[in-house]
Image: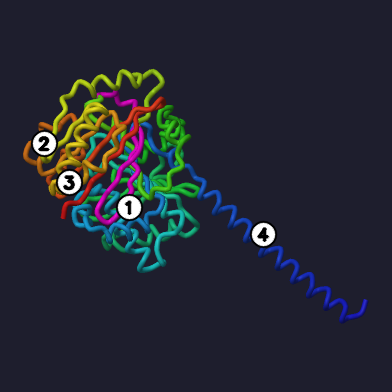
Amino acid sequence: MKFKTVVKLSVFISVLLFCVAVGFYAFTQLDMTKRNREVNLYSLIPSNCTGVLESNQTTALLNDLSSLNYHKELVQFQFPGLFEFLLHHLNEYAVNNAHGLSSQMNHLMVSFHQPGTNRDQVVYFRTGESDIQLFEDMIQEYAPVNFLPKEETYQGKTITVYPLGQDEFLAAYMGDGYMALSFQKRLIEEVIDAQQDKKSLNEDPVFAQILQKKKSHSSLTLYGRSASFPFLKLNQSCWSEYEFHLNSDVLYLTGETYLPDSCLSLSDIEQPILGQNSVYEKDWLLSTHRDTTSVFMEKTHHLMEEGERSLFNQCVANLSKDAAYTMVVDMERVVENSELFAGCLPSLMLNHATLLRSFIVSAQLSLTQNRPSHVWVLTYKN
């Protein structure tokens, strides 16, 4: 074989091998990314949690919040603790040093646990190839000078404990494509227990109904282990979802309440609704039947035709006539007499009524053949 032919053949084989190597690398990276995106974070969340907050577009959500007219109120009405700490520092560090959060870390979850203090939270991320390093670099930047993480073993898994200064520590559990973080090491141990013993939220039969149905494109969703309306007095085996939809002046929360098969029927749920008295005042409307809702809406339309086009009346005019239960209240009224609304408003709203006094809250409950569905609307007054 001639020398030139050998050289040409060698070059061809080299190029071919290079292409195969590049293709193999690209395929493995694509496969790794796919596997990371498919990590089921619910399989890490302990089933005894009291609630879960999920964001699948964290960066976009942070950008949207700053453009809302009620941004100041929303900043005050937040989920403090670990969620706030990580979201603020990690997003700030990523923007300044790594062009923002990766597509994997843009999807995060927060689980809330008893006794319910700001420290009783776990934050979960999906992670890509360089996200662990990004997280550790961020922690080191905000950590004390004598920063020295230590590792502990639990159920054969490694928990890394990072000192944050002032006797604060952050416990982390990292695996293939995921990371769980908490101020409480005991909660990270519960995460490992949930994963190892198959006792996660993913195994909860009621929450499984949400996962089977879940096709939401909402950037923020809250799941709570309670009924959407306190007066229903359902036991804590039920779950309610609240999908957040934001615009400049209105915050919508929509979703359903999911019940165990052995729980009350929808006809039983109607009884506590009918047991309440209807109210029609200038800053508070409460209707326990479709007929009374229609009457109240007709009165409101008549008032608006006479020139009383208050924001409260506009909120009433936008109601659905088909709901089984309807309430509209100016939160200023709630601030003045919160005990009056103990059965109508969730504890989260009652406990933060002062921060929400700039809103009118509208809520409706509908009963279908499958489960109760709800709509909460917070309309900004200023």
Mark 4 vs mark 1: in front: 4
Measured Cα–Cα span from mark 1 to mark 3: 63 Å
Q: Residue at x 16, y 28 (%)?
A: 278
Q: Position of residue 154 (x, y in %)?
A: 41, 39
Image-quadrant location for residue 23: bottom right
Mark 1 lies on residue: 162
Task: Name the residue type under label 4.
Answer: Phe
How does the figure colour the protein chain or chains? Answer: rainbow
Q: Position of residue 125 (x, y in %)?
A: 41, 49
Q: Earlier in the sequence, mark 4 or mark 3?
A: 4
Q: Residue at x 79, y 72 (%)?
A: 12
Mark 4 vs mark 3: in front: 3
Task: Name the residue type under label 1.
Answer: Tyr
Q: In this view of the protein, which residue sits in the foreground, 68 or 267?
A: 267
Vertical arrangement, residue 347 with respect to residue 13, above or below = above
Looking at the figure, which quarter contains the N terminus?
bottom right
Looking at the figure, which quarter contains the C terminus?
bottom left
Q: In this view of the protein, which residue sits in the foreground, 310 or 101?
A: 310
Whether the magenta-drawn stretch holds residue 245 is answered as yes
Q: Earlier in the sequence, mark 2 or mark 4?
A: 4
Task: Name the residue type under label 2.
Answer: Glu
Mark 3 lies on residue: 305
Q: Residue at x 16, y 43 (%)?
A: 352
Mark 2 lies on residue: 281
